[in-house]
Image (cartoon, grey):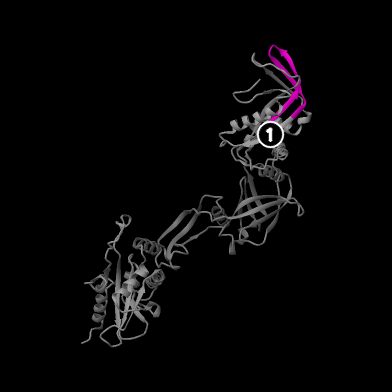
Amino acid sequence: MRDLGQLGELAFQSWCAQVGLIANGSRIDKTGWDFFVEFPISQALTPNQLHKSAINCKIQVKATDKREGKWQVTLSNLRQMATSQMPSFYVFLEFDSNSDAQRAYIVHIDNDLVYKILKKIHQVEQSDKENNLNSRKMTLHYDESHELKFLNGISLKENLLAYIGTDYSKYINEKSQFLETCGFEDGYGTVQFSLNGEESIKKIIDVSLGLEEELDIENLVSIEQRFGIPSKKPEFQLQTAKLKIGMTASKKGKIRFKEDKLSSGLMFDINFYNSPFSFNDYRKYAKFRVTGDFFDMTFEPYQNKANYSFSLGDDLRLEVKKLKDAITLINLMSRDEQSAIIELELESLENILSFNLTSKFVERDLEIFNQLLDKVLQIFQYLKIYDEICISLKELYFFNEKIEQFHTIITKASECNVRVEFGLNGENRLKQDQMVHISVSACRLGSHVIGIIFSVFGKPIEISENRYRLDSSDIKIERIFTFTAKDKSINESIQEGIDKIILMYDEKYDVVFNWGDNAKN
């Protein structure tokens, strides 16, 4: 009697033998596979490839006289093939009532098939119907795209390697990772619980926005799910519990504060947070949160409520113009009954969200910082400094006297009466009636130091032996410079600048300077 199954296995073994593939047959009919196929290790391995293992795969051979292009396979068999981390294949042989195979097809259990198989199994296991995987089947289809061009070992080997690729370890790792994650694209489960009263609804919204740490809940049920199909049995149940919720990812955007529709307003970068519980039946409790470098705001659009706080802590550095805008905003929002228009521009949202806000009076005294920042910006404008310089309120206050002095030198040089006193040692003598005193003045502004090299011109007056005084209102700014703590060679650069200035005046003036180890005074 003709044994079609035996014919199929013999044909497959013959092809493997032709190309040196070792086809180890399964002795127990419960493994899910017919052959464990071992590829020979290449003799052309480099030292870097010496550790690589041989390629192995599992093969299930199906023989038929029909030409239907499909085969029903039990879910238990499919599960064993799909969950194997090594490559798995079904080989379909069509004999057409002959003794030799007429056509052969290879179906690779790839990620798409693994996904379909595991999803089908999970559906069966979680259904109320018969869930014996040995009696439930799934149809595998094959067509010309799976067909071997030639019925021999060479064609078989080439097709198997085309699916597996050249990096066997990579295949194993990627399939293992896919097996662990497939079906969880929409999450790992659901959590059901009860809330008691209106205040609990408000609090869960606050927790989801990061405004509260946790809240009390009742009747907690956790249900696992995969492929969007929930498990029949809950993972666990609790009568009471405390719930913590991670904040949802923020949307980037900008917020603009305007006193009226025609004003340009103050604009700042923001992170926008919305609560997943602010919709449908709970829309009237809706709340969203907006955070920036120095502010944290919450808005309840259906309640016409808003809360906001500002923090320009000691060490918070902002770009000077942004810090100026920040103080302007804080002053604006600290007025009593100040109306403001707020506009939100959010990524992936075409329309601008706009609403009105009325502030409440808060006593604050930021005028000294406002005035200092005005002077800093004037210094930048006068010296044509375009670097992005950042400073904190603490630094602004600490260096306020230096900023005032520097501002005066920069903006009112022609109005300044400068007195310079200096001494000369015995080796140096004044030779000219007029002299120039070269000085360096620097001012620390947060992340940067800005400075000038300036010259004071006039006639020296001897006030004691080898001690002189220079009174002058004739001041010239020679050079402007900025640097950060990373600039290690700034002293040498300043000295080079002074040396060049000395050469400009050395023939007509006695030159004195107060910088570096070679200071002449």
Question: What residue is drawn where x is 61% and y is 25%?
Answer: 516
User: For mark 1, what is the residue?
Assistant: 479
Percent coordinates x, y for residue 174 in the rendering: 39, 62
Q: Is residue 456 magenta?
A: yes
Q: Residue furthest right?
A: 415
The answer to if 15 sits in the magenta stretch is no
Q: Most prominent secondary structure in the magenta stretch? A: strand
**Farthest top residue in view:** 465
Relative image position of residue 121 (x, y in whole percent): 37, 71
- Residue 510 place in picture, x, y as percent: 71, 21
Q: Is residue 515 left or right of residue 151?
A: right
Res 397 quadrant in image: top right
The magenta segment is 452-475
| Residue 133 appears in view | no
Few, some or many C-alpha atoms within 10 Å of disc 1 (few <14, some 14-19, many ≥20)? some
Three-letter residue code for mark 1: Arg
